[in-house]
Image (spheres, rainbow, N blue to C red):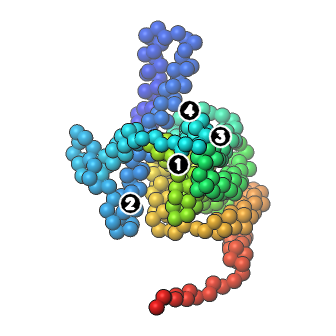
Amino acid sequence: MNWLETLPLTIKATLLSAAAAAGLPEALMPYLSAVLSISPILMVFPLLFALTTVCERKGLGRIQNRYGPNRVGIPFTNIRLAGFGQFIADGIKSLTKEDVVPHKADKLLHFLAPIVLLVPVLLTFSVLPIGKGMVPLELDAGLLFFFAVGGTAELAVFMAGWSSRNKYSLLGAMRGIAQMISYEMPLILSALVVVMAAGTLSPMEIVNQQAVYGKLGIAQWNVFSPWGLLGFVLFFIAALAESNRSPFDLPEGESELVAGYFTEYSGFKFALFFMAEYMGMFAAMGMGISLFLGGWSAPLKFLTFIPSWMWFFGKLILMIFLVIWIRGTMPRMRMDQLMAFAWKFMLPLALMNFLLVGAISFMPSMLGQWLAAVPIIIFAWCGLARGLGGGRIPAPRVYRFAE
């Protein structure tokens, strides 16, 4: 086995052995082990958030034919004008910026809202299998824990909007809650399709079942099945909406609501909201990778020499790139379009996928599954899309100019 494969586990085991040799009481060893499991999450994913903000700003600048960050370099390195030190400057600014709280705000709830949003997001990473045998908290019902903890985000959004005593904040919170509840249903239903096929709620066991290679050396990822491909598309779209990412970023519609539910937040509290949004996106995409894209497993058998945790983060980076690409190319939806899309299109397709996996998952031939499923998926997709548009053909646009 490649030494890079076991490097994180080796470092943890070495530190535990050193602590035992130094005379640390046996009763404290489980707590030290928990700290060593949590520390990589608290270091790696916030660093990924910081780098993603810079890459996103530079990528959107390239897409929109403008400059992104290109001045602040990283100290004591040759990276001077690349702009990759921008997150350091932004972090210092957030720490030193004045914290302004409205006079009539509920100060306790106003203070707790960003914490209530960030802490559950960090807890969701505890059940993500980052590599082979590398999961901070292995639970038999890990998927249930993931969605249960992630569901507290609605409470934090409501706390932020209500406590600010601002009509724009309250309207943004109401929008955010309606959107998150609406898209949480297709998100969970698309994940439960995998549970039906795998027969387990453990993310680690779901990944292990996908890390099996066929005669041609191709991994048996769920996305290679018809129900898995449809489930992945639904999960990805719903995860974008849950993360308030474009084109579903209506709770932060600056042309209507200033900045949505965190309009009255500044300084470090605003930075916590900003980080929680990105970390929630990482967690959702990481769970999507585990459910449909094989998690830490390689796509081909001869590529298994690459460490498993590198495969996980490589897939996560590709998903982040796709999210940034969508933000740079797709316009924001209207609120009525957003809600109709969830209830009239996403939810019926997710329920139809339940029937599909129950009907074809026991067919021995993958080709037979595709031949049986493709006509059903196309018929349902086109029918629901036509119903979503009201069955009307859009009229040509007419432009009128003031004289």
Helix, strand or loop under label 3 = helix
Q: Percent position (x, y) of residue 121?
A: 57, 41
Precedes in sequence: disc 2 or disc 3: 2
What's the residue type where badge 1 is placed?
Glu
Cα–Cα span, label 2 and label 3: 32 Å
Residue 198: which numbered mark, if any?
Answer: none
Residue 329 visible in the displayed image: yes
Q: Nearer the viewer, mark 1 or mark 4?
A: 1
Pointer 2 local density, CA inside 10 Å: few below 14, some 14–19, many at least 20:
many
Identify the residue position indicated by label 2 in the image: 59
In the image, what residue type sits under mark 4? Answer: Pro
* Pointer 1 residue: 264
Q: Residues within 10 Å of mark 1 (few under 14, many from 20)?
A: many
Residue 136: assigned label? 4
Residue in the foreground of this view, choosing between 324 and 255: 255
Q: Give the number of the mark in front: 3 or 4.
A: 3
